[in-house]
Image (cartoon, coloured by chain):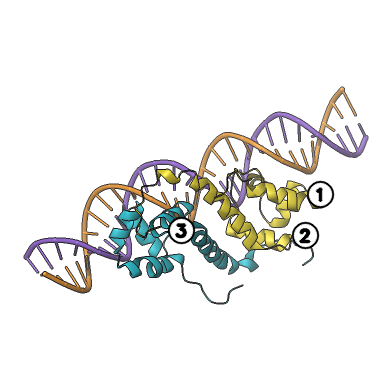
Chain colours: A yellow, B cyan, C orange, D purple
Amino acid sequence: MLMHNPPHPGEVIRELCLDPLGLSVTAAAEALGVSRKTLSAVLNGKAGISPEMAIRLSIAFDTSAESWLNQQSQFELWHAEQHRNELKVKKLVAA
Amino acid sequence: MLMHNPPHPGEVIRELCLDPLGLSVTAAAEALGVSRKTLSAVLNGKAGISPEMAIRLSIAFDTSAESWLNQQSQFELWHAEQHRNELKVKKLVAA
DNA sequence: GTGCATTGACACCTGATACGTTACAGGGTA
DNA sequence: TACCCTGTAACGTATCAGGTGTCAATGCAC
């Protein structure tokens, strides 16, 4: 279990994909085939990386869709872990 | 890219968690702290495994939340891949 | 300096989904 | 018959991805 609040995957997209190529949000959104707002929301952590978005990223930037989706999963899991103690779950198998 | 239609993670839950312990859907749902309907939907592929559900499974069955979430991600990704050609995406980096 | 296009973030609407409760139909078993 | 388990439906809740529309700030041409 990670200790620090991980950055949302949108930041990683900006740093690894947009910045190196000097791409604007508008240009990247157009290339990805989504609206500026949609990409903007992802970049600013207002939305997560959907499977469809992961594939778009993999095509445009020749990367792995799995890696983007795993980053998103880990991010969501970390947030869910913060409320682990609120879940009333009975252990059915000894730890 | 996988060739075969992968089973939804719900089937895996039933085979790996419920069946070995002889648990009914009702009993398992109660232990997990969710409604019978919610678990039924997951088991029958009507709903996916949410991060919260992954944590519930990890507590109850002493398993890895990441593994359940990754299975779900791979499942969703496979379905999204089936519509890859419908996405109008421009390659920004040579393959 | 002034006008105009571009950029990027915001507010609102739509559709999908996870979860809850309640209720019903069918199958198995005592 | 009576009972439990299961799947499913309808309805309300909250969250969220995606779209269109709008707006402040920036930059360029004049």
Q: Quadrant of the C terminus of chain B?
A: bottom right
- The kind of secondary structure element at disc 1 is loop
Residue B92 tag number:
2
Q: Which residue is mark 3?
A: B49
Q: What is the C-alpha distance between the residues marked 2 and 3? A: 33 Å
Question: How far across and down, in percent of the image, does residue A19 sit?
Answer: 78, 48
**Considering depth in this image, is A68 or A35 the residue closer to the camera?**
A68
Q: Which residue is mark 1?
A: A22
Residue B58 tag number:
none
**Considering depth in this image, is D25 or B41 the residue closer to the camera?**
B41
Chain containing mark 1: A
Which residue appears farthest toward the bottom when viewing the image?
A: B3
Q: In the image, what residue type sits under mark 2?
A: Leu
- The kind of secondary structure element at disc 3 is loop
Q: In percent of the image, x 35 and y 61: which residue is there? A: B40
Q: In percent of the image, x 44 and y 46: which residue is there? A: A84
Q: Pointers 2 and 3 in contact (CB under 8 A)?
A: no
Q: Nearer the viewer, mark 2 or mark 3?
A: 3
For the residue carrying disc 3, how many other residues have a C-alpha within 10 Å: few (<14), some (14-19), or many (20+)?
many
Question: How far across and down, in percent of the image, does residue B47 sit?
Answer: 43, 59
Q: In the image, what residue type sits under mark 3?
A: Ile
**Considering depth in this image, is A5 or A15 the residue closer to the camera?**
A5
Asked whether residue A84 is in view, the answer is yes
